[in-house]
Image (cartoon, grey):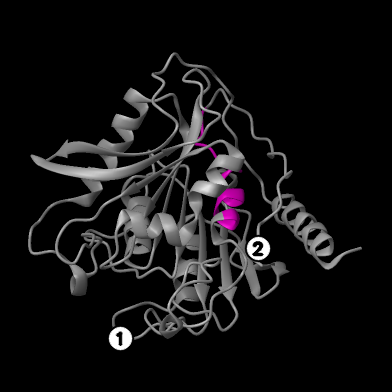
Amino acid sequence: MEPAQMRSHILTIFIAMLLIPIGTSVAQENTCAGTSPPTGESRETILVDDIERDYLQFVPSGYDGETPLPVVITMHGFTDTSQGIRDDSDFNTVAEANDFMVIYPQGLGFPPRWNNGLSQFQREDDTRDVDFLRELVHKLTDTLCVDASRIYVAGFSAGGGMAHRAACELSDLFAAAGTVSGAYSEIPGGCQPERPIAIITLHGTADPIVPYTGNDWLPDIGTWAREWAQRNTCDLTPIELESIEDISGIGYEGCADNVAVNFYSVEEGGHIWPGDTEAPALLGKASEVSGSELLWHFFSQYALPSASESHRPTDPSTSIMANS
């Protein structure tokens, strides 16, 4: 077997093993008579608290305006842009292959940032980005054929901190949350999600910007993941997840509502979205494994709970991509 074929075979086996152990909940499919915007990418705006906010919207070519699709909302880091996180994550490629939409919101300020609760990076204004995310979800469900039970939130660095805050305050809207190199803070009023919410995080062990073991104002990442396991009333004895190349992980299972908390470590990884092999060297080592594939395969197992829906696993039919 050729090396490329061998890698593809190994990755396919890995994703199957990754998905099988987790109790999952997937919403029953339905249809809707939605609008049919041009597929591909567009820049959109929304008025929130009398401020015009903008975001990039990617609609896969398979969208027909009648079959509801999942959505992943992905937020950039401090000083970055919606275009930047689109390029770094390559989420559009994953969305096109798996038929879901991706939304990349743009932070405010100069440099751009999120009011995620992290005092070092707060804007001087009191604009609530939580409101922005809430209104954005409402607009998406009102104007597109979206599966409202399968909307997910993700973010990188300070955007990961914003995804964390969204999980704390908007668990009624998001089926799962994912972070990469997340910079987390104490949420004003505390983190009190309305329901258990599935969490996945990826973090480089040699991250020079957001240290893996924390510092005076950022938490240890392992401790942060365990706290989510406690919120979700999981079994606090973690299981070892299957490794892939330079990424290993632990998972907390036995959680309320069949959710899980998965914590992946990128060995010697820097402050980089896994798969972004063109990132500046000063940010550290980049993994060739696609972080966006890892996040999507975790997300795709979860939907907002409904009394009328049964729990069943999704089909683990797609392999995680690695850049060569």
Left or right of 295? Residue 77 is left
Residue pictured at 64% horizontal, 72% vertical: 247
Residue linked to disc 1: 216
Residue pictured at 69% horizontal, 39% vertical: 313
Residue 256 belongs to the span the image colors magenta: no
Please state which amino acid type lies under the numbered disc 2.
Ala
Number of marks in picture: 2
Residue 300 seen in render: yes
Residue 276, horizontal then vertical, whole percent: 51, 67
Q: Are marks 1 and 2 in contact (CB under 8 Å)?
A: no
Say what amino acid the circle numbered 1 marks: Asp
Asked whether 107 or 237 is in front, the reply is 107
* Residue located 38% across and 62% down the image: 160
Q: Secondary structure at mark 1?
A: loop
Q: Which residue is mark 2?
A: 322
Q: Quadrant of residue 132?
A: top left
Pointer 2 local density, CA inside 10 Å: few below 14, some 14–19, many at least 20: some
Query: Is residue 304 covered in magenta?
Result: yes
Is label 1 or label 2 in front? 2
- What range is drawn magenta here? 293-306
Q: Residues within 10 Å of mark 1 (few under 14, many from 20)?
A: few
